[in-house]
Amino acid sequence: MKITADTNVLVRALTEDHVEQSKAAQIALSKADMVALTIPTLCELVWVLRRYGIRSDDIAATLQGLLGGTNVVVNRPAAEAGLAMLQAGGDFADGTIAYEGTWLGADTFVSFDRKAVKLMQARGVSALLLSN
């Protein structure tokens, strides 16, 4: 079976915070011929894991392990852009947003988020801080 994993399935499998659901999630993920991980799901996963109090470095390591699964399919360049931002101290979602925007034809990431813009610029991404 080829599956798309919802965020709650990933959370249960990774955190093991609910005995029955965690086991069911782990079995579904391991038995699937293919596990499609969407970028919105990964963004939600990072958000939830942060709410669990998990450090960004540990989240990045968890994502790398997840993405390294032999049955996992993901928009790898977008996920790697998100990981690069996360590892630089920024937000995973910002990295994926900037990547996808470029893929769609944009040439500059714009935001009111000073930290995001600074991190993008440090990575060589054209980014502009909007003032209010």
Image: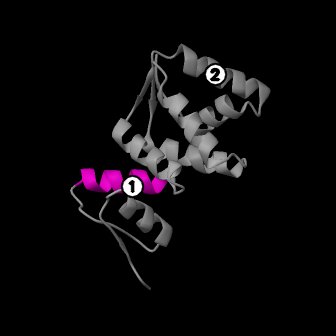
Dot 1 crowding, Cα within 10 Å, few <14, some 14–19, many 20+: some
Percent from the top left, x then y, of residue 3?
Answer: 47, 25
Give the amino acid at mark 1: Ile
| SS state under label 1 | helix
Quadrant holding the C terminus:
bottom left
Looking at the image, is 65 positioned above or below residue 88? above
The dot on residue 97 is 1
Q: Main secondary structure of the magenta part?
A: helix
Q: CA distance from mark 1 to mark 2?
A: 29 Å
* Boundaries of the magenta span: 93-104
The residue positioned 45% from the left and 19% from the top of the image is 71
Percent from the top left, x then y, of residue 113?
Answer: 48, 70
The dot on residue 86 is none
C-beta proximity under 8 Å, tags 1 and 2: no
| SS state under label 2 | helix
The residue positioned 25% from the left and 50% from the top of the image is 103
Q: Which residue is mark 2?
A: 26
